[in-house]
Amino acid sequence: DIQMTQSPSSLSASVGDRVTITCRASQGIRNDLGWYQHKPGKAPKRLIYAASSLQSGVPSRFSGSGSGTEFTLTISSLQPEDFATYYCLQHNSYPYTFGQGTKLEIK
Amino acid sequence: QVQLVESGGGLVKPGGSLRLSCAASGFTFSDYYMTWIRQAPGKGPEWLSYISTTSGFTKYADSVKGRFTISRDNAKSSLYLQMNSLRVEDTAIYYCARDLAAGYWGQGTLVTVSS
């Protein structure tokens, strides 16, 4: 199985900060990776698909990059509604696997 | 807009069964692979199963293979997960998602397996 190592597991930041979250795959997955935002009690929401493509309707302060084994999600200027848990998902090789998550909290 | 609504969760004893449903709307259901994902308390999400557009192909995680069965009814725009021989470790929120890359998710339904 492909392991997705996501870091950091938690992060405290302030409104307006730039934040970067990383996922590393245990083997190459091309660009078969998505980033998801999850708030308690709500449906998880995909932000980025194919590693760097912005999902329709998602603010442009979110961006993704990477290919192969290393990927990043960047939020350029944190807004209050961005405090949530973020996950990456690889869909290159079954079983598809998620990172363990990054909980983004208000400093 | 795309909407996925899960139902059928609840409290069940170990060894019991439960059938989850997912009602889809806002897109042509029969055009998309569909997926079940779960998230146990305090853990990251786990990919469970997917089904092809015409039900001709299914895939399962090892953790549920032989116990869970995914199915769909395109006429009803509905996805199902039949869960048998439930274990305590199956306790989780169960989500349905559209396509293999989980482009859209429902809000989930809670399954609790406990004696």
Image (spheres, grey):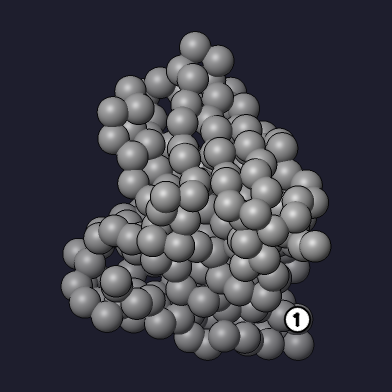
Q: Is residue B74 above or below residue B8?
A: above
**Residue A80 at x, y percent in the picture:** 75, 68
Image position, residue B80 (x, y; %) = 55, 33
Helix, strand or loop at mark 1: strand
Frontmost residue, B33 versus B8: B8
Q: Vertically, is B68 above or below A88?
A: above
Res. B94 visible in picture: yes
Q: Residue furthest toward the front?
A: B15
Q: Is residue A79 visible?
A: no
Quadrant occupied by the C terminus of chain B: bottom right
Residue found 68% across the figure and 87% down from its top = A12
Q: Quadrant of the N terminus of chain B?
A: top right
Look at 49% across and 12% down and name the residue there: B75
Vertically, is A101 above or below B52?
A: below
Q: B42 or A82, which is in the foreground? A: B42
Q: Pointer 1: residues within 10 angstroms few (<14), some, or many (20+)?
A: some
Q: Amino acid at mark 1?
A: Ile
Is residue B39 found left or right of B7 in the rendered image? left
Query: To which chain does the residue with label 1 belong?
Result: A
Q: Which residue is mark 1?
A: A106
At a point 40% along the width and 57% down the height, the residue shown is B61
Q: Quadrant of residue B54?
A: top left
